[in-house]
């Protein structure tokens, strides 16, 4: 990456980190159910997933967690995310999944997978988005394969706010706004058998898609009930 791009990403990351802090400080989050967060249930490292377009408040969802690594792409927006994550005190792993074999190397998909595997084996939890690259709200197989290889559980989470601006871009991103109400929900753990074949992995990915949609719907319904 050129130094000018790196400097721009650092400035953007600083501004975004400040904005996210503002949103978290001014949002009235509903109390998280005691014992619902993965690190409150056990000391076992975990894999955390949310939709790409709903990841803005991931730091709020992770409040209280320790030893966490967050996957960030090699693109400029990934550089910005990495800056935000590191300012928050978490580790980043650079790379992203792809459906195109020729792009596996340029996206650093395989080294990133191995880094996440090693992090989980060493006691560090990992956070990544569930979507197939550039396909909104369809979970890919990468996290399922990571759970199969490491034996670590997958937890799904939704972190949403009543004050937000919903975009119509590819991932249907929601931009959280300050001074609203918030809700964070975590799922039950999902384990993947080490002997799971490709068909089973695909079925689990489909199940994750449905569960993530249901979890976000429940979080938004919770905000409506609290009005």
Image (cartoon, rainbow, N blue to C red):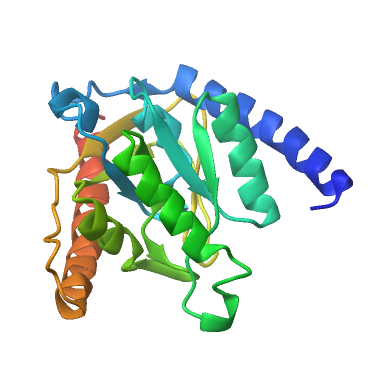
Q: Nearer the viewer, residue 6 or 18?
A: 6
- Quarter in which the C terminus is drawn: top left
Compared to residue 82, the image places residue 210 above or below, namely below
Q: Nearer the viewer, residue 89 or 197?
A: 197
Along the horizontal axis of the image, is 167 left or right of 132?
right
Question: How many numbered marks, from 0 up?
Answer: 0
Along the horizontal axis of the image, is 39 left or right of 73?
left
Q: Nearer the viewer, residue 53 or 84?
A: 84
Task: Report if residue 213 is visible in the image.
Answer: no
Direction right: furthest residue: 4
Compared to residue 169, the image places residue 4 above or below, namely above
Q: Residue at x 14, y 62 (%)?
A: 194
Residue 125 is drawn in which quadrant?
A: top left
Task: Report if residue 138 is visible in the image.
Answer: yes
* Residue 75 percent location from the top left of the image: 66, 57
* Residue 106 percent location from the top left of the image: 63, 69
* Residue 81 percent location from the top left of the image: 59, 42
Q: Residue at x 64, y 56 (%)?
A: 74
* Residue 28 percent location from the top left of the image: 36, 21
Q: Residue at x 77, y 34 (%)?
A: 11
Along the horizontal axis of the image, is 98 left or right of 29?
right
């Amino acid at each position: 990456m050129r130094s000018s791009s790196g400097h721009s990403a650092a400035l953007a990351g600083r501004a975004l980190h400040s904005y996210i802090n503002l949103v978290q400080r001014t949002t009235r989050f509903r109390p998280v159910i005691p014992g619902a967060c993965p690190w409150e249930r056990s000391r076992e490292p975990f894999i955390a997933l949310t939709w790409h377009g709903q990841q803005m408040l991931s730091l709020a969802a992770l409040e209280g967690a320790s030893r966490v690594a967050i996957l960030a792409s090699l693109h400029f927006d990934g550089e910005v995310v990495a800056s935000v994550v590191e300012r928050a005190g978490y580790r980043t792993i650079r790379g992203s999944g792809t459906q195109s074999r020729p792009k596996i190397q340029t996206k650093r998909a395989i080294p990133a997978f191995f880094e996440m595997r090693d992090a989980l084996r060493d006691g560090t939890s990992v956070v990544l988005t569930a979507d197939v690259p550039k396909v909104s709200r369809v979970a890919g197989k990468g996290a399922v394969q990571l759970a199969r290889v490491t034996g670590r559980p997958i937890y799904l989470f939704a972190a949403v706010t009543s004050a937000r601006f919903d975009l119509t871009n590819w991932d249907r991103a929601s931009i959280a706004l300050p001074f609203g109400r918030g809700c964070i929900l975590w799922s039950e753990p999902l384990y993947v058998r080490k002997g799971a074949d490709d068909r089973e992995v695909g079925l689990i990915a489909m199940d994750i898609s449905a569960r993530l949609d249901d979890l976000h719907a429940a979080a938004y319904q919770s905000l409506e009930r609290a009005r």
